[in-house]
Image (cartoon, grey):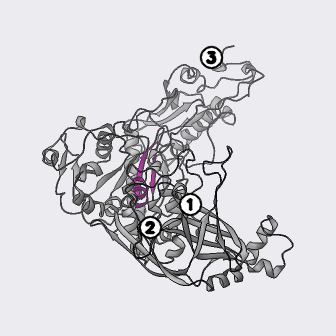
Amino acid sequence: MAHILDRPLDHPHGPSCPICILPAIRNLRQESTRAAIRIEELDWTIITKLGPKCDLCKLAVELREHWQSGDADKQMKYDGRSYSLMCENGAWWPPFQPRRRMWTMYTDFDDVLAQRIPTYLISSDPLSDPSKRMFKQWIKKCEDNHPRCCAKYDSLPTRVIDVRHSSLKLLDPSPSGAQPYVALSHCWGSCRDFLTTRDNIELRKAGFQLAELPATFSDAVLVTRALGIPFLWIDSLCIIQGDKEDWEVEGSKMADIYSDATVMVAATTATDDSLGFLNPRKSHRTATLEFVDSPSSSSSSGYKGNKRVARVYVQGDHEVIDRKDRLKERAWCLQERYLSPRILSFEETVTRWECFTENWSENGRGHTNGDSLFTDRDNFTQLYRKWPNMIEHYTRRHLTFRSDALPALSALTARTSQYANDQYLAGLWKKDLLSWLLWKPASYYDTTVKPCRPKDNPAPSWSWASYAGPVAFQLFQGITPTNTMISIPSTVLVDASVSVSGLNPYGEVQSGSVLIRAPVLRMMLQESRPTPEKNWQGYESHILSYPDNAGIEKRLSAKLDYPEESRNVVTYGIPIAHRSGAKYSEQHVAAGNIRHSASEDEVSNLALIYGLLVREQTQPCERRYERVGVFEIGWTPLDRFLDLLKELPDEEYIVV
């Protein structure tokens, strides 16, 4: 059976639609087509009659009325409709199919119909002329209307790439004064084809051609030129690779580099710099309808040259699939997204805009960033409060070098520290540091690979950065006014310090220690019995035991950082906090975690105890210890546990 669009649209029950009968519509299933529709040549009696049945006819009637009004030079206003229905031709429609064909209608973002049809045609060329005009308009709208997004820059980065001429140049030093520039966010991948080093920096300054660059870099140059911006900053070209001192100096400026950029271009689809991000998009069959209205006089307003033109693009149903944003998988790119006031993201099927104030999309439909973590990205006081959530997100991203765990976050840390009124210590903050120490390996790490401590550990054992995998912060989960964390009074933070290895105070750490005074529980790891249904550890938590003040062995659960290292090793538990509260306890009674026969006083006295697990270093020195994990003592009478601690000596432990 031939498709309805291949048949004549005339039928005995009424007149044919002079627009929908056009070959541009009828042949849409076979090919992309184009038709010019002259307003003055249409039969408006028929079109007006069909308007209630056909969105395209209704649109044509309203467009004609608009062009005849005094607002012809303005865009038509949005009327709340979704333009997708074509003419109803009942006599010709098969009985087993819907009586109306669903389409999607688009226009251009700067067309007279742009507000009436707020869905815009996306070109197969990510850098088409309409797209370039749209990107420039986004920047102008943001600069003119968004005070939150205004850059406060005084100067360019140390080095930038000059893209104004056919021969590109690395400017070192950059021109003085505040000037616009683009910053690139990208995945290096395995591509190392075009880096700046001490050996070739003079060649970079002398000039190089676009064709010499890997695809992602050359695409970034094309975008920068399309935006009319003279300079481009790319980390691997503007920071001298292999030069530790230059890297530390420039790395410490990263917060300003991204926050001062006119716009950050995000190459979201390229997993490697050799792939590029301006690759042609999948094209779809499109009927292009140009409504043309010739002027009655040369002085009429709203005309383009000697005529008015409005474009409507009609497409059939098609699936839109966006590939994953590869930048969301890379640790380095997290701070780049936080710090950049304006982001232009080139995705698989669409380009999107995200600034501190609004989000826009090339298709006109708008979008959200989809992640509450990035809400109010410019509120660094809030980021300080959300630091545990941010770190949990960050540690799920990938790093090529584990030594970059802290440097890859240093720019964001530097900016946050300006608002935190707190001391930064190897990925944590000194206020409430004892609670911060209770991070744990997250339960969703890859259970097919046993975690192994990095040979060149980038941080002290008490920092989350020492763990090669995602982490979670135990004490910061599920906190409510009736479910609070309370410090163990006998555990005291005496001192904490960190020594960095370079010039960046937020970068790579050379050493660090935490001095804690506390009564400590001597514990022993119990053997677990793995089963095929469980992960390689056997249990989500390992089981330890310790003697209480009555000499009875008590069992507790622990989350070990590197379990294979902790077998048959004496560990020490430093109790840090307890979680209690009558309402919280009642929830666990209902869940069966606490026996129902417990009295109200017994329940209110119960608490969960949390603490840090440490072991003595293999080469003892001044009673130094290293972290091996965290522990949790299940519901236990709080007063009895505190009495036990009073019987233990308070000693000082240096955790490194």
* Residue in the foreground of this view, choosing between 446 and 586: 446
| Magenta span | 332-356
Q: Position of residue 527 (x, y in %)?
A: 64, 57
Q: Position of residue 166 (x, y in %)?
A: 19, 39
Q: Can you identify the residue that label 1 sits on?
A: 568
Looking at the picture, which amino acid does disc 3 mark?
Asp
Q: Can you identify the residue that label 2 sits on?
A: 617
Which quarter of the figure is the C terminus placed in? bottom left
Q: Outermost residue, top direction?
A: 1
Question: Which label lies toward us, 2 or 3?
Answer: 2
> Which quadrant of the view contains residue 146?
bottom left
Q: Position of residue 172 (x, y in %)?
A: 16, 55
Q: Position of residue 47 (x, y in %)?
A: 63, 31
Can you see residue 507?
no
Helix, strand or loop for disc 3: helix
Between discs 1 and 3, the one toward the N terminus: 3
Q: Can you identify the residue that label 3 sits on?
A: 6
The answer for how far apart the CA atoms under marks 2 and 1 are is 14 Å
* Residue in the foreground of this view, choosing between 479 and 288: 479
Helix, strand or loop for disc 1: loop
Between discs 2 and 1, the one toward the N terminus: 1
Q: Residue at x 47, y 41 (%)?
A: 350
Helix, strand or loop for disc 2: loop
The answer for how far apart the CA atoms under marks 2 and 3 are is 81 Å
Residue 432 on the magenta span: no
Q: Is residue 329 above or below residue 155?
A: above
Looking at the picture, which amino acid does disc 1 mark?
Asn
Please state if 527 lies on the left or on the right of 190 as rendered: right
Between discs 2 and 3, the one toward the N terminus: 3
* Residue in the foreground of this view, choosing between 595 and 361: 595
Residue 336 on the magenta span: yes
